[in-house]
Image (cartoon, coloured by chain):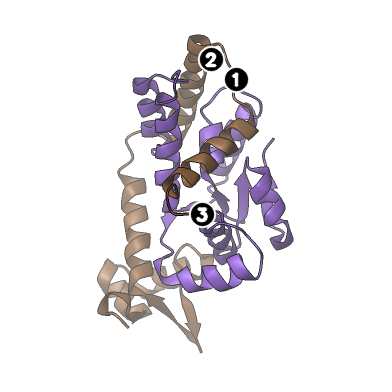
Amino acid sequence: MRPVCIDASFAIRSVLPGPARGKAAALWARWIAEQRRILAPQLWVLEVTNGLWKLTRAASPLVDEPTAREALEYLLQLPVEFYNLERRALQLWDEVLNQMGITTAYDAAYVLTAMLHQADLWTCDRRLSAEAAGAGLVHLLE
Amino acid sequence: MQETDRLLTVEEVAAYLGVSTKTVYRWLRSGSLQGHRAGWTWRVHRSVLDEWLANRRRRESRQRPPEQVLAHLARISKRIRSATGREFSTDDIARLIREGRAERATGVY
């Protein structure tokens, strides 16, 4: 069974109300039932934290802070394995940023994590989905 | 190469974890533990092993079963909807993440 790699947008989609939240939840449930490995680069923790934090700090807060903190606490309880790319920075530069034309190292971190584990990469980000389409591993949740 | 990233043999991995070499081979073949084939045998980076162990410990120390976590995330989502009366599109969420990244670069360009 192929592992899956998820980005921060997928994680936040799993908790904010809106279209495809149910799909994200159903995918989590399926992967957990199938005992699939669910992977993310270590960057994921910071991006999820930052995204939820930003919701509480908007000019007119979109989510109150205790709720956003609780969402983070629960997202971190999901069985995600974190992958350290420290030894892979040059590979990320050469093979993902340069050769594949991914435009940020943040996105490249998700793509490389998926490539190294032959995993399906799930995101809500159209730009990432379009840029990494050539790798044949990206799934856009919409 | 740093000592912390030395390549370990299957025997060394087994001794480090206190399991049999048969168990280590099973993890390597299933892909649960990432290793490199070296002829007939395998080698594992020490850093990969440490990370694998940390993930395993994190998994074992989780306080709640994943099904319970998912059910609670659904409740949080409902709570946010009733408090704010709004929904977030997938594009809103992608933008939230991208803007967080751009903010870190403010002042550089």
Residue in the image at 69% along x and 55% along y: A131
Q: Which residue is denoted by mark 2 in the rendering? A: B81
Marked residue chain, label 2: B
Image x and y of residue A55, in percent = 45, 27
Marked residue chain, label 1: B
Considering the numbered disc 2 on the image, is that residue within a helix, a strand or a loop? helix
Marked residue chain, label 3: A
Instruction: Kindly identify the amino acid type of the residue bearing the numbered disc 2.
Output: Arg
Q: Which residue is denoted by mark 3 in the rendering? A: A106
Q: Are marks 1 and 2 in contact (CB under 8 Å)?
A: yes
Query: Can residue A106 be seen?
Result: yes
Identify whether A79 is placed above or below B27. above
Considering the numbered disc 1 on the image, is that residue within a helix, a strand or a loop? loop
Image x and y of residue B75, in percent = 48, 19
Residue in the image at 32% along x and 65% along y: B50
Q: Is residue B83 left or right of residue B4?
A: right
Work out whether residue A137 or residue B87 is closer to the camera in this orientation and state it. Answer: B87
Work out whether residue A122 or residue B70 is closer to the camera in this orientation and state it. Answer: A122
Considering the numbered disc 3 on the image, is that residue within a helix, a strand or a loop? helix
- First in sequence: mark 1 or mark 2? 2
How many labels sit on residues?
3
Q: CA distance from mark 1 to mark 2?
A: 7 Å
Q: Is residue B57 left or right of residue B31?
A: left
Instruction: Kindly identify the amino acid type of the residue bearing the numbered disc 3.
Output: Tyr
Residue in the image at 66% along x and 63% along y: A101
Image x and y of residue A21, in percent = 60, 28
Tint of chain B: brown
Q: CA distance from mark 1 to mark 3?
A: 26 Å
Query: Can residue A80 be seen?
Result: no
Instruction: Kindly identify the amino acid type of the residue bearing the numbered disc 1.
Output: Glu
Q: Which residue is denoted by mark 1 in the rendering? A: B87
Image quadrant occupied by the N terminus of chain A: bottom right
